[in-house]
């Protein structure tokens, strides 16, 4: 199992889906998790699940990651309790998808705010603590949509925002290197979560079947798939992986 013993890990969006899976996985690996979410009930339930397994997790909720005050409160909680931060996992995001002719400016701005701006704000707040710790890692969630056009789901704003995450990660790697801070990103394909379920439902059974037929691994992704990769990238075993984007998409991009 990946070893994160004693590491202090900030993970955003732990109220469900990939964030909950990450909180459970990081805690199993020995990390002390500090999560956050707007979803108060979901965030508290994740803490209970981690605790039942014998893990250690704190959570701050509700936290609006588009607010500097909200982000600062979350990061300050970790600093106040543990005195340092070793890992920042920018997992949280909310997208607006739909056909291009229905992509209003409001929807466009919403995606950029909740998928790109929140990565900037969280990283900016945690950065001094990562430096003070003598190094660490920032893991950002990008998307396959940042690399290729989607055939089954219209993702103009989502793809643009996640493309920004990809670029930001590479520049962050340069800024972090002198401080021993690594920056990496993960590009998932379609992962089945409560947030993506409405999109999957809209595609319909035939559409999903068609999508799966184009995935070499012949299935959609699970939150646990991404959580396991994130935990490895956060560990010292991945210390020479820096500035990279790792696709976790069942082979979609490799087969393109």
Image (cartoon, rainbow, N blue to C red):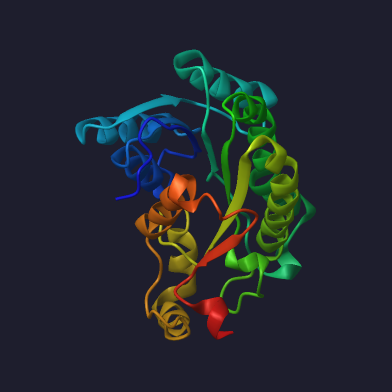
Quarter-of-image position of residue 104: bottom right
Instruction: Residue at the far top: name it.
Output: 80
Between residue 136 and residue 12, name the one nearer to us: 136
Picture quarter containing residue 59?
top left
The foreground one among 35 and 230 is 230
Where is residue 236? Give x, y as percent: 46, 45
In this rendering, position of residue 194 left or right of residue 87: left
Q: Position of residue 75 (x, y in %)?
A: 56, 24
Q: Is residue 241 above or below residue 35?
A: below
Residue at image location 32% in from the left, 36% down from the top: 30
Q: Residue furthest right?
A: 105
Give the total number of marks visible in the rendering: 0
- Residue 9, compared with residue 153, is above or below; it is above
Q: Is residue 147 above or below residue 61?
A: below
The answer to which of 250 and 13 lies nearer the viewer is 250
| Residue 110 seen in this snapshot | no
Whether residue 123 sits left or right of residue 51 in the image: it is right
| Horizontal and vertical percent position of residue 143 | 59, 62
Q: Residue at x 48, y 77 (%)?
A: 251
Q: Quadrant of the C terminus?
A: bottom right
Residue at the spot x=40%, y=66% of the render? 221
The image position of residue 156, as x and y in percent, is 70, 65
Residue 69, compared with residue 122, is above or below; it is above
Is residue 229 visible in the rendered structure shown here? Answer: yes
- Residue 229: name its quadrant: bottom left
The answer to which of 229 and 59 lies nearer the viewer is 229
At 52% from the left edge and 49% from the top edge, which residue is drawn?
A: 239
């Amino acid at each position: 199992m990946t070893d994160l013993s004693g590491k202090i890990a900030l993970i955003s969006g732990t109220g469900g889906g990939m964030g909950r899976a990450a909180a459970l996985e990081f805690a199993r690996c020995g990390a002390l998790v500090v999560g956050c979410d707007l979803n108060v009930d979901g965030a508290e339930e994740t803490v209970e699940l981690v605790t039942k397994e014998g893990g250690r997790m704190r959570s701050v909720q509700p936290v609006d990651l588009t607010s500097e005050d909200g982000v600062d409160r979350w990061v300050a909680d970790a600093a106040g309790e543990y005195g340092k931060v070793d890992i920042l996992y920018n997992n949280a995001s909310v997208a607006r998808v739909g056909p291009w002719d229905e992509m209003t400016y409001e929807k466009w701005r919403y995606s950029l705010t909740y998928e790109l701006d929140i990565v900037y704000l969280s990283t900016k707040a945690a950065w001094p603590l990562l430096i003070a710790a003598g190094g660490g890692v920032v893991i950002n969630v990008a998307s396959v949509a940042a690399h290729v056009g989607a055939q089954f789901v219209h993702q103009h704003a989502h793809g643009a925002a996640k493309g920004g995450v990809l670029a930001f990660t590479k520049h962050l790697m340069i800024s972090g290197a002198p401080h021993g801070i690594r920056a990496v990103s993960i590009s998932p394909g379609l992962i089945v979560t409560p947030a993506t379920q409405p999109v999957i439902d809209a595609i319909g059974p035939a559409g999903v079947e068609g999508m799966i037929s184009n995935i070499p691994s012949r299935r959609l992704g699970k939150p646990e798939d991404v959580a396991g990769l994130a935990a490895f990238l956060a560990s010292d075993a991945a210390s020479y992986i820096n500035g990279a984007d790792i696709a976790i998409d069942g082979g979609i991009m490799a087969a393109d």
